[in-house]
Image (cartoon, rainbow, N blue to C red):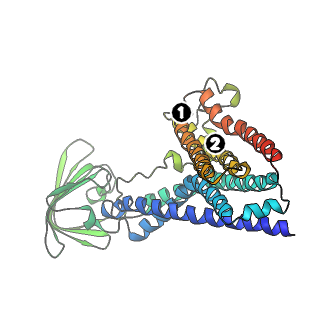
Amino acid sequence: MVKNKIYNYFLKEIFKSFITILFAFSIIAWTVRSVNFLELIVDDGHSLKTYLYFSALNITNIIAKFMPLSFLLALNLSIIKFEKQNELIILWTTGVKKIKVINLFFLISLFILILQIIFSVFITPGALNKSRYLVKESTITSFNILVKSNNFSDSLKRTTVFVEKINPNNELETIFIRDESNTFQSLVNENGKSSNLSIFAKKGVVKGKSLVLENGVIQSLNEKGKLSNIEFDKTVLYLDNISTRTISEPKMQETSTLNLLNCLDKFSSFTNNYLSNECKFEDGKKEVFQNISRRIGMPLYIPLVSLITCLLLVSNLKKRKRVINTFSVGLAGFLILVLAEIFLRYTGNSKFNTLLYFLFPLALVPIMYIILFVRSKKELN
């Protein structure tokens, strides 16, 4: 009963440190990244609601990336705390074997491993894909944001806008619109056979999701290749269907893991072809393997760094040497994560590199466990 309370205490302290560190790292990184997302409002004219929702969905990716480092720091700091408060000495004197505590820390690392795989494989791609779909389906809320005085604006997809002046009443003066997307082709031809519209107007006012133009001309190229001009005193351009140049198609990191796995050819032909014929990332063989390795392979390094950190439990050193040993063990775990991130870039270059990335932690984990087991047996508990 007492031992169970001790184990529960260790679990509580480690998870409390882990969540605190992960939250701190994630919030800082998310805040910095959210600043970059402001271009959705400033440059692309999306609403504040779209920006906030898009930013919130992207935090899942940040959480997944910081999990290994946060767990490493949490485990190191917790062991240091236990030692300073003499809790480990009390634990050893009560007859608790060190290998039991090592097993506890290892089981915690397996839980964090599963948690990161859930985030990396399922939650993050789904959230990022939803954020991209949100931008794709979102309409522009303010046309005025997209245009500037005496400047050509190409923020709109296949549409160029020039406004000579914006007066204090937010009225546009001397307007030129070049529409190559046929968004406004209904102004000249309801059959949709006109293209490359050029619209000139002396004045314009944005009202809601429409642009009211006055005293202008619409020039279009008809199906016979001839130019036609239509003069108008007043016309309305509805802005509901226009879209910005914001990338709307999902990137590789926003693609579901299942779809990426479908990009891989059958394992029997792994040495010959990396990608199946149905993969839309035909030019990104290396990137496909990097994404899969990051989602499935990177979490495998978490149990390894936890066992490296457990070296602190089986070392009976004097105070000065213990400080050096603590720093060395923490640095070793950090270097493992850094090397895992570096080697990730080389996965997909060859079959050997990819397999090595996955097998390296799987091979070292039992070796490290045997070392800890032998050293714990040699010491007096």
User: Where residue 211 appears, x then y in whole percent?
Assistant: 25, 68
**Would you place residue 226 above or below residue 236 in this image?**
above
Q: Residues within 10 Å of mark 1 (few under 14, many from 20)?
A: some
- Residue at 64%, 67% (x, y): give it: 16
For the C terminus, the quadrant is bottom right
Residue on which the image places disc 1: 346
**Would you place residue 107 above or below residue 45 in this image?**
above
User: Where residue 358 appears, x then y in whole percent?
Assistant: 66, 37
Q: Amino acid at mark 2?
A: Gly
- Seen as rendered, the residue at the extreme right is 1
Secondary-structure class at tag 1: loop
> Which is more toward the observer, 7 or 248?
7
Residue 366 is tagged as: none
- Quadrant assignment, res 32: bottom left
User: Where residue 229 appears, x then y in whole percent?
Assistant: 16, 54
> Which is more toward the observer, 270 or 193?
270
- Seen as rendered, the residue at the extreme bottom is 169
- Residue at 62%, 64% (x, y): give it: 17
Q: Amino acid at mark 1?
A: Tyr
What distance separates the C-alpha of mark 1 from that of mark 2? 13 Å
Q: Residues within 10 Å of mark 2 (few under 14, many from 20)?
A: many
Asked if one can make out residue 279 in the rendered structure from this viewpoint, the answer is no
- Residue at 64%, 32% (x, y): give it: 356
- Quadrant assignment, res 80: bottom right
Which mark is first along the chain, 2 or 1? 2
Residue on which the image places disc 2: 297
> Which is more toward the observer, 378 or 181?
378
